[in-house]
Image (cartoon, rainbow, N blue to C red):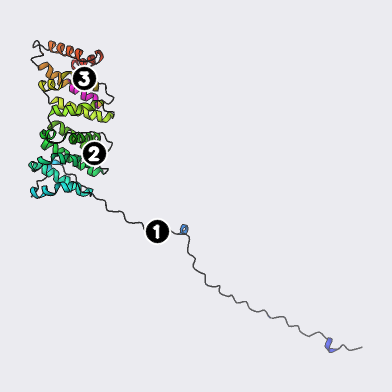
Amino acid sequence: MALRSLDNALPTSMERPRKVAKVATPPPPAVARKPAPAELAPDSRVSEEKAPPLPAVEQSVEYVVSEEITPLSDPHTKMAVLLDELNSKDWMSVCQALNDLRRMALHHSSYLVPILGNVAEVIVKAMKSPRSALCKTSIMASTDIFHSFGHLLLSTTEENAFDQLLLQLLLKASQDKRFVCEEAEKALEKMAISTSPLPLLKKLQSYVHHANLRVRAKAAVAMSKCVSKMGIEVMKEFGLATLLQMAAELLNDRLPEAREAARSMIYSMYGEFSNDSDLKKDDDESSAAESWQNFCSSSLAPIAAQSVAKIVSL
């Protein structure tokens, strides 16, 4: 038997290939990714963005009632700079000057008499300001001016200055801003109490036909206060028939405030009319009522006369 060659013999043992151990290679360091603004918490986003500017400190104005207004220590020195301060471009400075004006009006009124016209113009300018605080302070100043100078205001100021002051007060009293509206109503009431009724009533007469319902109503209230202060002679000077016609027209106004003021005017007129010796025929009340009805019939249209007559007969 032939022997196989050793070269062709199979190896007695086969070496298996060695397994190389796999060593885990650490991953490259991760680059920190900047989170998107949406992923940030609200506080973090604000810190990275430019912080908004801090709100300006709100300036407050102190409203001092007339009873708490104190006199000035040196009114002469204050008077020398008062008009300049009232015309300042800084509204807070104007508010302070208006309060000083109130102190002058209530405690040192003689200093203001020569410049009442300038004072009225400055107050009107401040009332037109869009700043409610300045507007209210100027209205409070007008109340104190009426208190101290009501008997002089119509004769010492220019006609246009007083007309503008009256218009602004009626407009402010007709506003929706309650704290301005209420202050303007107080000023109008003080005006009606302090000012001579006849010249003031002549100023208010044109507002009977004003297009603004609220202005018309506020004017009617002021007119009723004027009429309540008038005696029969002053009413005659104004014109009894004219006065009655004004009241009759307001009696049909759309606003209850104006209608109530018209009734008050009619009551005041009837009270003075019935006590007038020139108009009374006898002392009995029936003749006074008859004279009143005749007067209404001669001064008004039949329907208006009937409406007016009903008021005093109720």
Tell me the residue that label 1 is attached to.
46
Query: What percent of the width, then of the height, locates residue 55?
Result: 31, 54
Q: Which residues are magenta?
A: 257-266
Q: Residue at x 46, y 59 (%)?
A: 37
Q: Amino acid at mark 1?
A: Val
Q: Amino acid at mark 3?
A: Gln
Helix, strand or loop at label 3? It is helix
Location of residue 65 by image quarter: top left
Does residue 183 lie above or below 275 as drawn?
below
Label 3 vs 1, first from the N-terminus:
1
Q: From the viewer's perspective, is the residue at label 2 or at label 1 nearer?
A: 2
Tell me the residue that label 3 is attached to.
245
Q: Which mark is residue 180?
A: 2
Q: Is residue 261 left or right of residue 150?
A: right
Q: Amino acid at mark 2?
A: Val
| Depth check, front residue: 305 or 157 | 157
| Depth check, front residue: 194 or 13 | 194
Label 1 environment density (alpha carbons within 10 Å; few <14, some 14–19, many ≥20):
few
Does residue 24 lie above or below 90 as drawn?
below
Q: From the viewer's perspective, is the residue at label 3 or at label 1 nearer?
A: 3
